[in-house]
Amino acid sequence: MKPRNCTLLTIVWVLALSQISITVNSQESNYQTPQDLIEYTYRLMTFDAGDKPDWSIIKDLFIEDAVIVLRTSRTDMSIMNRDGFIELWLRDYDAGLKETGITEEKIVDRYEVMGDMAISYVIYSVTIPDKDYPPQYGIDCFHLLKQNDRWYITSIVNEVLRPGVDPPQSMMEEFSKYLGR
């Protein structure tokens, strides 16, 4: 092989490897702070009609033994692990979300970081595009853990905001402004 061809081949390999490194580092950078992890989580939970979320990336947000507690009706809470959480999303996806998509938007968030652990409270809205019902509001409480230079979700406890269930006082004013009250 001519020296010029070797140089060109080396440049192509270096560029290819640097692109792989950029892709890996850009994904990992989503987990460098608790705020980045939570922001990325809500982006992953939002998708357009016809799009399919990457369930393996969603699964990677959690530690293996994560616990998720979701309000599943006005009177019931469901407790599940990360696989059960993804199974619930898959059922909802197959039951109609693949045709409509879904939007989960962070409205107000608060963080407390103490070393390698953090707590985050997020008031969010959920809307289903092209459906005639108003946004639904809820609050997620995340417990986070930093391991191997990145943050993971260890647990989520979810509650739906409704009459008699208000956001924490520390978030009430900002949420009221969002609602225009």
Image: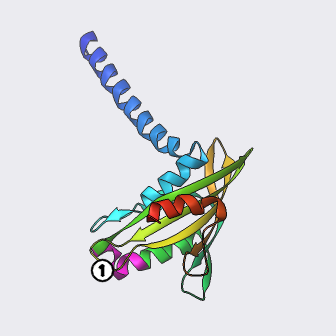
Q: Residues within 10 Å of mark 1 (few under 14, many from 20)?
A: few
In reply to whether residue 95 is colored magenta, the answer given is yes
Relative to 29, is 95 on the left or the right? left
Residue nearer the viewer, 61 or 13:
61
**Residue appearing at x 55%, y 51% in the figure:** 37
In reply to whether residue 107 is colored magenta, the answer given is no
Q: Measuring from the top left, give residue 44's x and y in whole percent.
A: 43, 58
Say which element carries label 1: loop
User: Magenta segment, principal secondary structure?
Assistant: helix
Q: Which residues are magenta?
A: 92-99
Vertical position of residue 181 compared to residue 77: above or below: above
Q: Residue furthest right?
A: 115
Q: Measuring from the top left, give residue 11's x and y in whole percent.
A: 32, 20
**Residue appearing at x 43%, y 79% in the figure:** 91
Residue nearer the viewer, 151 or 25:
151
Q: Residue furthest front?
A: 181
Q: Measuring from the top left, give residue 42's x and y in whole percent.
A: 47, 59
Q: Residue furthest top?
A: 3
**Residue appearing at x 48%, y 52% in the figure:** 40
Q: Measuring from the top left, give residue 120's x and y in whole percent.
A: 63, 56
Residue designated by label 1:
132
Vertical position of residue 7 compared to residue 131: above or below: above
- Specify the quadrant that holds the N terminus: top left
Q: Quadrant of residue 75?
A: bottom right
